[in-house]
């Protein structure tokens, strides 16, 4: 049962342009989604907060340096 | 049974090859814009097969550049760059939120409209997420979910995908990619943004086809 969604023009265009590039990466990415990324979704796919709570990065550290008298 | 195969809820037989590929691109972009990639993701990008790219030299070239950068730039440097470019101190140098481009400020009317549309589609922000829904990563994730479908959700039609894309991504996403590319502190994310731009150009052109 194929969903007839795309017109032939659209399909051919997309087949030529996109197919065969990131499939292998997506296996890693989608596999990760149970524990990592996506932000909004229906609850099935989803994330973990980007950086849990406050933490000091080098960038923040530099900012602190500038506040010292 | 592997945990990874269990993640694919949609029935792959109902998804055309090109739509599978689009969903994959959206998944990858959601990851790259949500946070700096970890070593595992970088390695996956490096070892991925070369794109054939006969239809879009831009996309193929952008992918090769991204793969090269993923091999050469250490994850710690990318993490620091992500903080500098997209987080910053006070106002982020490069905004990843649609409202900012569409209305000039964050948390503006476009975000309210987006929340209505997401509710109508049955999407909600995950409980542990603090980012507003108009974050580029969130919108890419919604596109992925629309294309793939999910438990109790059929894959969205092209018309439905187009409606969401046109309202919430089309009018600012290339601008956001270009802002990332132009920002002086961008390095790895110049490659990410160029790759994203090439992909979104293809999406925009494809949605305009009859």
Image: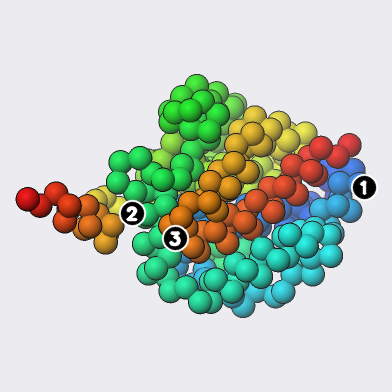
Residue A62 in the image: state x and y as whole percent: 22, 57
On-image quarter of the N terminus of chain B: bottom right
Residue where numbered disc 2 is placed: A51
Q: CA distance from mark 2 to mark 1?
A: 44 Å
Residue B24 in the image: state x and y as whole percent: 66, 57
Q: Quadrant of residue A18?
A: bottom right
Crowding at label 3, few (<14), some or many (≥20) Cα neighbours within 10 Å?
Answer: many
Residue A60 left/right relative to B113: left
Q: CA distance from mark 2 to mark 3?
A: 11 Å
Which residue is at the far right? A8
Circle 1 SS class: helix
Residue B107 in the image: state x and y as whole percent: 43, 28
Residue at the image position 70 percent from the left and 75 percent from the top: B49
Residue where numbered disc 1 is placed: A8
Give the mark nearer the N terminus: 2 vs 1: 1
Front residue of this view, candidates B130 and B70: B70
Residue where numbered disc 3 is placed: B36
């Amino acid at each position: 049962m194929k969903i007839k969604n795309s017109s032939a023009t659209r399909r051919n265009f997309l087949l030529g342009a996109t197919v065969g590039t990131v499939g292998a990466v997506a296996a890693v990415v989608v596999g990760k989604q149970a524990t990592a990324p996506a932000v909004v979704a229906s609850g099935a796919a989803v994330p973990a907060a980007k950086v849990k709570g406050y933490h000091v990065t080098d960038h923040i550290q530099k900012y602190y340096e500038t506040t010292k008298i | 049974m592997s945990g990874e195969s269990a993640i694919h809820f949609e029935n792959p037989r109902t998804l055309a090859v090109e739509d599978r590929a689009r969903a994959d691109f959206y998944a990858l972009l959601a990851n790259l814009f949500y946070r700096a990639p970890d070593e595992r993701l970088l390695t996956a990008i490096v070892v991925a097969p070369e794109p054939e790219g006969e239809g879009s030299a831009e996309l193929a070239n952008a992918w090769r550049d991204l793969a090269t950068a993923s091999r050469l730039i250490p994850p710690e440097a990318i993490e620091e760059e992500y903080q500098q470019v997209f987080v910053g101190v006070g106002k982020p140098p490069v905004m990843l939120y649609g409202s900012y481009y569409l209305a000039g400020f964050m948390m503006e009317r476009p975000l309210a409209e987006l929340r209505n549309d997401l509710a109508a589609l049955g999407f909600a922000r995950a409980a542990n997420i603090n980012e507003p829904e108009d974050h580029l990563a969130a919108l890419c994730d919604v596109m992925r979910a629309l294309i793939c479908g999910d438990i109790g959700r059929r894959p969205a039609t092209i018309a439905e995908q187009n409606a969401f894309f046109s309202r919430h991504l089309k009018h600012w996403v290339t601008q956001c990619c270009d802002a990332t590319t132009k920002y002086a502190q961008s390095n790895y994310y110049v490659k990410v943004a160029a790759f994203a731009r090439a992909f979104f150009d293809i999406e925009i052109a494809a949605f305009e086809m009859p």
